[in-house]
Image (spheres, grey):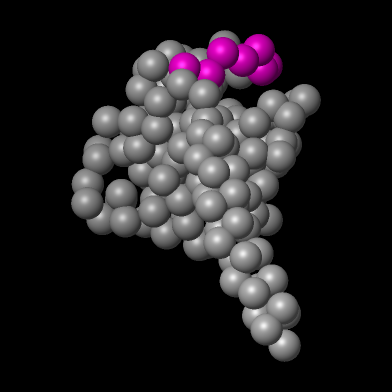
């Protein structure tokens, strides 16, 4: 019995630090250099038509964290937008790190709109064709908060 208890204690004290160390090594790149398809020109020119308001940020947060379907953004991009969601780190290429201002300042609103609406070929980013346009725009406002 004592041997078993000693083994459990040993595994706990060895396993917990190893799990924590593994989590720390999973930080997303910043800046993220990637060659993913660019949106068509008509999308690249788009600018978010909605004013940033607290109500819209809350709605964007709800979509990002809970309500998006088929999959909530947080599962890949992480709850803090840093690209370290449990599914995003396994993706190839890894999920976009929205918290990296160096990366995000080079991504237009239109590029983000296109990526959300249509998905990104060659990545694990799914399409959300049924998401209403205004919801995509409030989602973009929320996503931009991560790098501001």
* Residue pictured at 52% horizontal, 24% vertical: 29
Extreme residue in the front direction: 2
Say whether residue 72 is visible. no
What is the quadrant of the N terminus in the image?
bottom right
Residue at horizontal 47 percent and vertical 17 percent from the top: 31
Which residue lies most toward the left here?
Answer: 54
Magenta stretch holds residue 36: yes
Q: Which residues are magenta?
A: 31-38
* x, y percent for residue 82: 46, 37
Please provide percent x and percent y for residue 58: 31, 56
Of residues 129 and 126, the one drawn nearer to the viewer in this rendering: 126
**Dominant secondary structure of the magenta stretch?**
loop
Does 99 lie within the magenta span?
no
Q: Residue 56: x percent and y percent?
A: 30, 50
| Residue 143: % across, % down | 40, 39
Quarter of the figure that contains the C terminus: top left
Indicate whether 139 appears above or below 27.
below
What residue is drawn where x is 56% and y is 13%?
33
Q: Nearer the viewer, residue 87 or 69?
A: 87
Q: Is residue 12 visible?
A: yes
Identity of the residue drawn at 25% across and 40% down:
52
């Amino acid at each position: 019995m004592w041997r078993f208890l000693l083994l459990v204690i040993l595994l706990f004290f060895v396993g917990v630090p190893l799990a924590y160390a593994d989590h720390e090594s999973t930080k997303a790149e910043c800046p993220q250099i990637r060659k993913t398809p660019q949106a068509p020109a008509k999308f690249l020119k788009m600018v978010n038509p909605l004013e940033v308001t607290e109500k819209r940020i809350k709605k964007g947060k709800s979509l990002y964290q809970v309500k998006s379907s088929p999959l909530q953004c947080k599962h890949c991009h992480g709850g803090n937008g840093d690209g370290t969601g449990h599914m995003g780190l396994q993706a190839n290429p890894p999920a976009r790190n929205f918290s990296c201002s160096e990366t995000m300042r080079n991504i237009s609103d239109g590029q983000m709109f296109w990526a959300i609406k249509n998905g990104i070929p060659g990545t694990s980013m799914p399409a959300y064709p049924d998401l209403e346009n205004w919801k995509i725009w409030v989602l973009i406002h929320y996503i931009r908060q991560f790098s501001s």
